[in-house]
Image (spheres, rainbow, N blue to C red):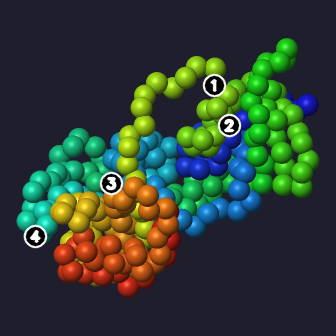
Amino acid sequence: MARNDVLIIGAGPSGLFAAAELVRHGVDVRLIEQEARSHHEARATAIQPGTLEILDSVGLLPPFLEAAEHVRRVRVYGPDMSELSGLDFEGIDCRCEFQCSLPQYETQRILETHLSSLGGVVERGVTATKVDTDADGVLVELVHADGGVERVHPDVVIGAGGAHSVTRQSMSEPLEGTTYQGHFLVADIAMQAPVPRDQGSFFCGPDGLMLLAPLPGGRWLTFQDLEEGVQTVSDEDVAARTEVRLGGRSRPTDVTWFSP
């Protein structure tokens, strides 16, 4: 059985950043990811001003500033495009008085490049199937893409695999809280939107709720409420729903990715 100081399960932004910082401080780290290759889905896009300060503290801010769209304000619109509310990031007492909007795969690309520069690697195609304890401490079972099974005893396990990860399931204590009831659609689209590109925009009306946030390359992330019972949508559905929520003012010309 192998032993590492730290085993990190999940090579998303949190796992990559944690691995890089630990490697930078001389810790023996192993970072595993069950997916064989990086995804190309927008997913989480907003990097908050406080997070940008953390990136700045470790010398990682410049590539994020260069790659991302800078969101300097948020506005809420009614069905007739009347402004209902808003906020500006100016004066928030941070070095960066804006959010960075960047597809998650770009965030991961920057962080993985940084990790590689420090000598760290991501082991892809490795799935943690069990986290348990035995006489020697924490025991983690790993299954490789070729079917091989490995058992390791890390001193510390960091679970960065999301809400449904084996790490969370293995915790002996329940996580308090309740599930917020809601059903949503998220998509990466291209269109000529009726709002500025340095702004996050919410649209509220009888046809539903929608967020538009700018993405690099002239694209937008849209986040919309979805009726309960609707399990799948098509590219055409995404375009039509977006147009309706904009009151017919604009319609996507391309839909790159959406979920569900």
Q: Residue at x 72, y 51 (%)?
A: 34
Above or below, 61 relative to 58? below
Kind of residue at badge 1: Met
- Label 1's element? loop
Q: Position of residue 101 (x, y in %)?
A: 38, 60
- Please name which of the two marks, 3 or 1, marks the residue nearer to the observer: 1
For label 3, count other residues whose C-alpha is less than 10 Å away and answer few (under 14), some (14-19) or many (20+): many
Mark 4 crowdedness (10 Å alpha carbons): few <14, some 14-19, many ≥20: few
State the residue position of label 4: 80
Asked whether residue 27 appears in the rendered view, the answer is no
Mark 2, secondary structure of its residue: helix
| Mark 4 or 3: the one toward you | 4
On the image, numbered disc 3 is attached to which residue? 99
Q: Earlier in the sequence, mark 2 or mark 1?
A: 2
Residue placed most toward the observer, 188 or 118: 188
Marks 1 and 4 in Cβ contact (< 8 Å)? no
- Please tell me whether mark 2 or mark 3 is closer to you in this view: 2
Give the residue type at disc 3.
Answer: Gln
Q: CA distance from mark 2 to mark 3?
A: 32 Å
From the image, tell me which residue sits under label 1: 171
Q: Residue at x 28, y 54 (%)?
A: 98
Q: Disc 4 versus disc 3: distance between alpha carbons? A: 27 Å
Residue bearing mark 2: 166
Q: Which mark is residue 160?
A: none
Disc 2 crowd rating (10 Å Cα; few below 14, some 14-19, many 20+) is some
Give me the C-alpha separation between circle 2 and circle 4. Answer: 47 Å
First in sequence: mark 3 or mark 1? Answer: 3
Residue 235 shown left or right of residue 138 in the figure: left
- The residues tagged by marks 3 and 1 sit, at their Cα atoms, a distance apart of 34 Å
